[in-house]
Amino acid sequence: MEIRNIAIVAHVDHGKTTLTDALMKQNGASQNEEASMDSNALEKERGITIYSKNTSIYYKDTKINIVDTPGHADFGSEVERVLRAIDSILLLVDAVEGPMPQTRFVLKKSLELGLKPIVVINKIDKPAADPKRVYEEVLELFFELGASDEQINFGVVYAISREGRAFRSLGDTADTEGLPPSGGNPSVSSQGLNPLLDLILEKVPPASGGSVGKMSAQVFNLDYNNFLGRMAVARIYAGKIISGSQIFIKGEKNTRSEKITKLFTFEGISRKEVSEARSGDIVLIAGIPDIYIGETLCEDESVEPRPAIIIDEPTLSLNFLVNNSPFAGQEGKFVTSRQIKERLEKELQINVGLKVDFFNIGTTSANRDWSAALGKVYGRGELHLSILLENMRREGFEIQVSEPKVILKESDGQLLEPYEELMIDVPVEYSGAVIEKIGKRRGILKNLTEKGNINRIVFDIPTRGLLGYRGEFIVDTKGEGIMSSRVVGFKQYAGEIKKHQYGSMISMIEGKAAAFALANLQERGILYIKHGSPVYEGMVVGNVLKGEDMFVNPCKGKQLTNMRASGTDEAIYLNPPFVLNIERGLEIMHEDEYLEITPKSIRLQKKYQTELDRKKNNK
């Protein structure tokens, strides 16, 4: 049986997982009505893919291995690794939005590796869809990225992935009757996704090379199982892998020998244990506890290792600390430094985009500084780090984190910082406000194009300038703007960027917030708490619009007397609070604050909670 290896790549929310699920349902690999590839709870809630996953389908006596990849730029390192293990990509592009930052990123990487993409213009049933315009934009992008003649001659398919339908040509009346190029609701049945599958068999070269030659495979992803431990997802390039055999692992630093305990292949959304697998297949290998991305597996030490897989550098860092607030330990099950350290070490087993520098932690309570940072965690972006924090919170951990900081580098005596390409689609009437705000954050306008009433604006902006802007962007554009970005590398340090124009409203007392006090405080800024919320000294209960910190008593009640007069009683109206979640907290926190994260609560607090601590720090 022949094997084809493909990855589905696209910008976030262009339909990768929906198309993968439709392919599996059509070919009997999944009977689920829900999105079967997005199995993680956070993926289901957010509607995005966070972790790349493998599946396979059978079509016309051919096994097609499919890798569903994340679309958000923070998880771009996963996409980059996957591209090394497959033979072609399905590049999905939204028929309304067209090519976006992540589209450019994945296409550039695949063209550099010599892959020949297949373009799928998806969501052609949208009322605003314009597949002809999007096709021209994709073609222009291929030319711009320096594609070869063979790569520019790409196959194209038009699809409605949520309905499981694909068309080779918009002009083919047999398939597209009732489907005008500008969109509309298709009213005619088609061959399902068979046109896309036929194009895959036609354009993607066979991966299977039999079992001839000495075995050689390369690890491109990791998995973890509580019973089997760390497992490697690998592509076999030559020979065959046999379960129970002794193999050599060639890494950058050393060569070692290990025994394979179990071997799996992918069938639909499940894993099938096999005794052997041959060249061209993608397999899951258990029994190598210290396996890493990019290492070569071989049966003979004489086999040359495959080229290393380079993983993108992190761009942000923040400190992890033990929760030291007065409410510590009330909601979480895991609160000690040892438990948090073990959890981060487990995360490092599979999350290769993450790095952690652990600080010295004492072994007994006598010499352990409970307020000191456990370690510095490095990630690819705010979403990358907030996903880790959200997973830990749901598992019962209590932690504190510091404000995210960009990673700075020095080269030839120059200070460098990470920059991002920011693409914004915004109604014309809000363009001025967006350009003004981005300019204040050291953003440089690169391009502005008009599409009807929508402006597409492209900026180069330091990552520092982008931190905390998303909330302002939603307010400035009344929720009608779309913002996406990708890291483009390190450039010269842009200088000081002032982001926060407001101060913090800090509680002076421990207790429960009273509506009488909050009604007065809401006139000075925006509150993060509601009536009855527990507060403590040093907790940030809101922000102050004037820009300076203000110490308040949110527990103050109305003075009561035994006299009552109708003229002195008044109704209290409270505005809905600005409820903090992890992303919002990371965006709005100041340098002298910590974000306290527990299974039930997200709170902001000052690093020095009491007045005495603040006076000592000032001295």
Image: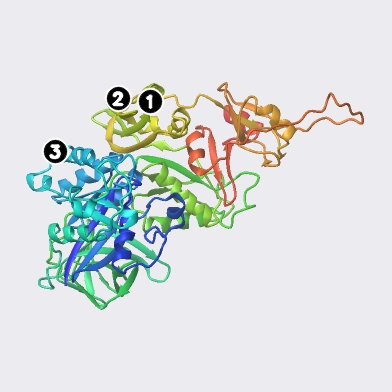
Q: Secondary structure beneath disc 1?
A: helix
Q: Secondary structure at mark 2?
A: strand
**Amino acid tagged 3:** Phe
Q: Which residue is mark 3?
A: 143
Residue 516 picture quarter: top right
Residue 571 in the image, given as x and y percentages of width and height:
76, 30
How much space separates mark 2 and mark 3, taking CA atoms? 23 Å
- Alpha carbon separation for disc pair 1 and 3: 29 Å
Along the polypeptide, which appears first: circle 2 or circle 1? 1
Query: Are dots 2 and 3 in contact, CB under 8 Å?
Result: no
Separation of marks 2 and 1 at Cα, in angstroms: 9 Å
In this view of the protein, can residue 599 be seen by the observer? yes
- Three-letter residue code for mark 1: Ile
Q: Earlier in the sequence, mark 2 or mark 3?
A: 3
Q: Of the residues shown, which amino acid type is indicated by label 2?
A: Leu
At mark 3, the secondary structure is helix
- Which numbered disc, 1 or 3, marks the residue closer to the eye? 3
Q: Mark 1 or 3 closer to N-term?
A: 3
Badge 1 vs badge 3, beta-carbon distance below 8 Å:
no
Residue that carries the numbered disc 1 in the rendered image: 438
Can you identify the residue that label 2 sits on? Answer: 445
Question: Dot 3, crowdedness within 10 Å: few (<14), some or many (≥20)?
Answer: some
